[in-house]
Image (cartoon, rainbow, N blue to C red):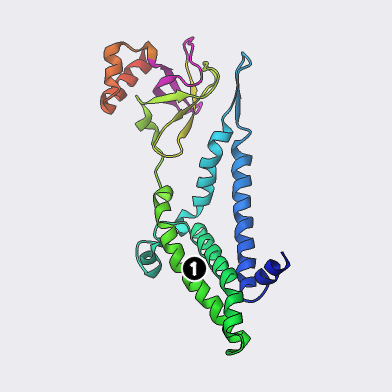
Amino acid sequence: MNAFLDTILAFPTAIFTIVLGVVMTYWLFVIVGAVGIDVFDADVSLDGDISVEGAGKALGSAKALAGSDADFDVDGGGILAAMGFAGIPITVSVSFVVFIAWFLSVMSAQPLNEALGGVLPSWLLNSGLGLACFAAGTVTAGFAVRPLRPVFVAKRAPGRDSLMGRVCTISSGSVTARTGHATFEDGGAGVILNVVCAKPNELKRGQPALILAYDAERRVYEVEPVDWLLPEEQAQLQDPARAAALARVKARG
C-alpha cells in the first residue's frame, strides 16, 4: 500500500493523480445530482398505489448531465476530431485521457526509473515520462471513446403539435380531469408529459393512451384510452397524418 501511495504521489504521476481526483469529484456530483433529481420522483394514486419512477430515470438524467456540455464537444474538423473525439462531450474526453495517462504513468514509472535512472537525470526522465503518458493516453482515449459517440447524439424533443395523435404510456396510478402523468418514447431518454382525461376512465400505469390536444393554459395534454377507439380508428394510428386528424376529431367531440 505504501509503495502504491509513493508511486501515485511521485512526479509525474502526482500531476495525473490530482487531475484524476478533480475528474472523479466531477462525476460524483453528476451521479449525486441525477439521483437527487429523479430518485424521489414518485406517483401516489388515491387508491394507495405507489410508483417510484425515479430509479429508472436516474441513468437517463446522468447521461443528460454528463452531456450537458454538448456545446463544448469537439467539432467535425481538426486533429482531435481525427483522433476520435468528434461528437464526444469534453468532460468525457478529458476523463478518458486523464485516467489512461494516470494508469500508464503508474505502471511505467518505477520500471523506467530502475532501468534508466542511472543514465538520465531524474527530472528529465520523469518529465519525458509524463509527456509520453499524456500523448499515449490521448491517442488511446481517442479510440476508446469512439463507441460512445451514438450515446451523445443530440436529439431534439418532439414538438407539441407532433405529439397529437401519438400514443403515450401512462406512468401514474390513474388519470383524472385534473392530474396524471405519462411518458412518450422519442427514441432517447423519453419525454414526461402531464396528462388529463375529462371523461371517467380506468387508465392506470402501463396502459396506452391517445394524445388528443394540448391545453396551453393548464400546460397539460388531453388524452383518452386507446381501448376506446374502434378497430378502424386504431388502424389509423399507424399513419401519423391520419392519427393527428383522428386526434383533432376526438378533441372536438
Rendered position, 96 above or below 202: below
Q: Nearer the viewer, residue 185 or 24?
A: 24
Verify whether residue 201 appears in magenta: yes
What is the x, y in percent for residue 74? 42, 62
Q: Based on the displayed image, in which of its 4 quarters is residue 36 positioned? A: top right
Which quadrant, please, contains the C terminus? Answer: top left
Residue 101 vs 118, above or below: the answer is above
Residue located 70% across and 69% down the image: 3
Total numbered labels: 1
Could you say where residue 203 lies in the image, as x and y percent from the top left? 48, 15
Which residue occupies 38% across, 11% down? Answer: 228
**Label 1: how many Cα within 10 Å (few below 14, some 14–19, many 20+):** many
- Does residue 123 sit above or below 9 in this rendering? below
**What residue sits 27% from the left and 18% below the top?**
235
Q: Can residue 126 be seen in this view?
A: no
Residue occupying the point 61% across, 85% down: 117
Image quadrant containing the N terminus: bottom right
State left or right for residue 222 relative to residue 112: left
Secondary structure state at the residue bearing disc 1: helix
Residue 77 belongs to magenta span: no
Report if residue 167 is visible in the image: yes
Q: Tell me which segment is drawn in magenta.
A: 198-226
Report the residue that reaches farthest toward the right. 2
| Residue of label 1 | 137
Relative image position of residue 186 (x, y in whole percent): 40, 35
Residue type at numbered disc 1: Gly
Return the x and y of residue 47 as percentages of the image width and height: 61, 13
In the image shown, does 252 or 52 lie closer to the viewer? 52
Q: Quadrant of residue 42?
A: top right
For this rendering, which residue is in front, 76 or 9? 9
